[in-house]
Image: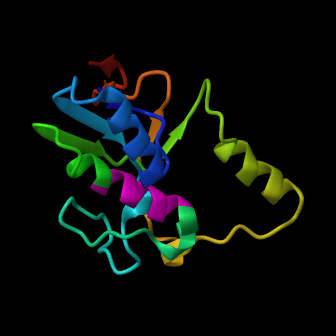
Amino acid sequence: MVDTNCYAGVQARDLIAALDGRVPVALAISSAAVYADDAPHLATEAAPTGGGSAWAEYGRGKNEMEAVHRDGGFSAAVALRPPYLCGPNENLDCATWFFRRILAGHPVLVPGLGAAQYHFRSRRRPGARRRPDGDLQR
């Protein structure tokens, strides 16, 4: 099962209950927002989680969703933590929100003194990687 929709633990619990043990493996699309404020720059899977304060309820919810999947009775449960998804079908208006804010002359607050290095991933092909020559590979 690939969970691309749960934003909170309660949603993950409902999903797992609906599956009723019929699915042995879970893959959840989580978020880098689960990393705690004291996580190191370029966090790894071992970094502290709990949700960064800049991400508020979203980070805490994704963190709880991961815990529910881990404890959900699957033989294997994996959470991918992409930092930022954009492109076609991006329904949260993440990218244009920043541009509209800048154009309106409002400040854009940047957590971590602006030192974060994020990899932007396309919603169209999140499993694709770019080769050094720029072409996509699967």
* Residue at figure coordinates x 38%, y 52% from the top left: 65
* Residue at figure coordinates x 71%, y 67% from the top left: 108
Q: Quadrant of the N terminus?
A: top left
Residue 36 falls in image quadrant: bottom left
Q: Main secondary structure of the magenta part?
A: helix
Q: Is residue 94 left or right of residue 138?
A: right
Looking at the image, which is closer to me, 112 or 36? 36
Residue 105 falls in image quadrant: bottom right
Q: Does 16 sit above or below residue 97?
A: above
* Residue at figure coordinates x 55%, y 65% from the top left: 57
Looking at the image, which is closer to me, 60 or 121? 60
Looking at the image, which is closer to me, 81 or 17? 17
Q: Does 57 sit above or below residue 122?
A: below
Looking at the image, which is closer to me, 85 or 62? 62
Q: Residue furthest left?
A: 75
Q: Does 101 sit above or below residue 94?
A: below
Q: What is the span of residues highlighted in magenta in the rendered image?
A: 58-67
Q: Residue furthest right?
A: 104
**Location of residue 66 in the rendering, given as x and y in whole percent from the top left corner:** 32, 52
Is 66 a magenta residue?
yes
* Residue at figure coordinates x 83%, y 67% from the top left: 106
**Location of residue 14 in the rendering, given as x and y in whole percent from the top left corner:** 42, 40
